[in-house]
Image (cartoon, rainbow, N blue to C red):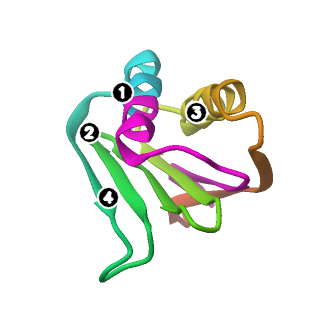
Amino acid sequence: MNAKGRHITLDYTGFTGDGKWMLTVLRAAISRSGAREVHAHVEEFDGVESPTGFAAVVLIDESHVSAHCYADQGILAVDCFTCGGIDPTGIVDDIHEQLSKAVPTINLIQRTELDRFVTEE
């Protein structure tokens, strides 16, 4: 089996923060990794139509990095999917380090890693 991509997810509890700040964290980690940012957007949810929180995404040439938060529950999900020459490990490690420094109550509950674009060759 051969994989052309890698997908890493992080699940947290104890998160406090807003979507604009989180988008800044994602973009900084991407910039430091050498990946090429294509587009970035954050949508804040006020609890009227969707639960309070946000969805932040940065599209990169190599795929994407995103974060989704249920603010009232303090839960945060981060994922990074890359293909080609960019390893997602450095990006998620950078994000984790920034979150750990800025949010003392945050707790990493789960980290998963999955090969993507798998072929039999």
Residue that appears at 29% across and 40% down: 60
From which residue to which does the magenta span run?
Answer: 1-26
Give the foreground label among 4 and 3: 4
Instruction: Tell me, yes or no, whether the two marked residues, 4 and 3, touch with CB atoms within 8 Å.
Output: no
The amino acid type of the residue labelled 1 equals Ala
N-term-proximal mark, 4 vs 3? 4
Give the foreground label among 2 and 3: 3
Q: Look at mark 1 in the image and give the residue it sits on.
A: 35
N-term-proximal mark, 4 vs 1? 1
**Rendered position, 49 above or below 92:** below
**Rendered position, 51 above or below 90:** below
Label 2 crowd bin: few (<14), some (14–19), many (20+), radius 10 Å: some
The amino acid type of the residue labelled 2 equals Asp
Instruction: Tell me, yes or no, whether the two marked residues, 2 and 1, touch with CB atoms within 8 Å.
Output: yes
User: Of helix, strand and loop, which one carries label 2?
Assistant: loop
The amino acid type of the residue labelled 4 equals Glu
Q: Look at mark 2 in the image and give the residue it sits on.
A: 61
